[in-house]
């Protein structure tokens, strides 16, 4: 009888811990904004979908990237492609924050606008020099791809395109630049895909203060009505 009571007690405690853990994680199951900044300057923002089965999904360059997550009540750990990102929970501001590759990451839930009010994304306040506040300068000569821009473009694409390459990008013009902690570039490109013809895209590049270049995103350019 004593053994039976002990078993029931252990089972009750175990179920209680499982329930408490599920309650602890329940607020996570939603769509969040993941915001990247370098110093006081915005780099990019993307939506991250947190699912009940301890997986998450983000859209990167129009591709779905998936991974797994764990949360111990204080730290959210996102794991994908062998890399981990740890974000600390701040109850006061109801958001997560952490560091990744020299950038500061903030994960927060979009604010639902009240009826009749203007939508508010809930984006953290960024100084006027930040990417989300504007600051893009239109290129003086939209028809020129200099050797410097061309070399920078292919340096970034060589790192971005791995494996079998199915889309050939041809830089046509620099549409604009933006000074952050480094420089962002918006490059108009032709994108030729096997058996699908040619479309137009804008490739966003980021060059850091050390001269290294990476692809931030590639956005389809819709033409016509």
Image: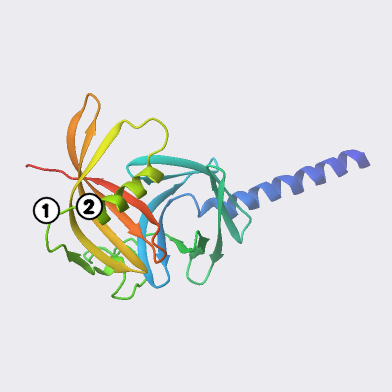
Residue at the top extreme, as displayed: 195
Q: Are marks 1 and 2 in contact (CB under 8 Å)?
A: no
Q: Label 1, label 2: how many angstroms apart (C-alpha)?
A: 11 Å
Disc number for residue 143:
1
Q: Nearer the viewer, residue 51 or 7?
A: 51
Q: Residue at x 25, y 40 (%)?
A: 169
Q: Characterize the local packing of mark 2: few (<14), some (14-19) or many (20 or more) Cα atoms within 10 angstroms.
A: many
**In the figure, is residue 216 to the left or right of 137?**
right
Give x and y (percent) for residue 135: 23, 69
Q: How many marks?
A: 2
**In the figure, is residue 83 to the left or right of 158?**
right
Colour scheme of the picture: rainbow
> Counting residues from the N terminus, which is met first, the one under dot 1 or under dot 2?
1
Q: Is residue 101 above or below residue 193?
A: below
Q: Residue at x 52, y 63 (%)?
A: 99
Residue at the front extreme, as displayed: 147
Give x and y (percent) for residue 179: 29, 69
Quarter of the image that includes the C terminus: top left
Q: Is residue 13 above or below residue 165?
A: below
Q: Which residue is mark 2?
A: 187
Give x and y (percent) for residue 89: 55, 64
For numbered disc 1, what is the local secondary structure? loop
For numbered disc 2, what is the local secondary structure? strand
Q: Nearer the viewer, residue 35 or 161?
A: 161
Quarter of the image that includes the N terminus: top right
Q: Residue at x 26, y 65 (%)?
A: 178
Disc number for residue 77:
none
Q: Residue at x 19, y 67 (%)?
A: 137
Q: Characterize the local packing of mark 1: few (<14), some (14-19) or many (20 or more) Cα atoms within 10 angstroms.
A: few
């Amino acid at each position: 009888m004593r053994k039976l009571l002990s078993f029931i007690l252990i089972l009750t405690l175990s179920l209680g811990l499982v329930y408490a853990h599920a309650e602890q994680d329940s607020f996570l199951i939603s769509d969040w904004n993941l915001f990247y900044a370098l110093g006081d300057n915005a780099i990019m923002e993307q939506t991250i979908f947190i699912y009940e089965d301890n997986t998450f999904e983000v859209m990167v360059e129009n591709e779905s990237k998936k991974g797994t997550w764990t949360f111990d009540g204080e730290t959210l750990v996102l794991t994908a492609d062998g890399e981990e990102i740890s974000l600390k929970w701040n109850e006061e501001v109801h958001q997560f924050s952490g560091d990744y590759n020299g950038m500061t990451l903030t994960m927060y839930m979009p604010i639902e606008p009240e009826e009749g009010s203007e939508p508010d994304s809930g984006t953290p306040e960024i100084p006027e020099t930040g990417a989300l506040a504007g600051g893009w300068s239109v290129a003086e000569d939209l028809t020129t791809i200099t050797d410097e821009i061309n070399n920078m473009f292919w340096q970034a694409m060589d790192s971005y395109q791995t494996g079998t390459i199915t889309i050939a990008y041809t830089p046509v013009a620099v549409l604009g630049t933006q000074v952050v902690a480094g420089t962002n570039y918006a490059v108009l490109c032709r994108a030729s895909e096997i058996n699908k013809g040619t479309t137009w895209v804008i490739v966003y590049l980021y060059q850091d203060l050390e001269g290294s270049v990476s692809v931030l995103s590639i956005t389809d350019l819709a033409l016509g009505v």
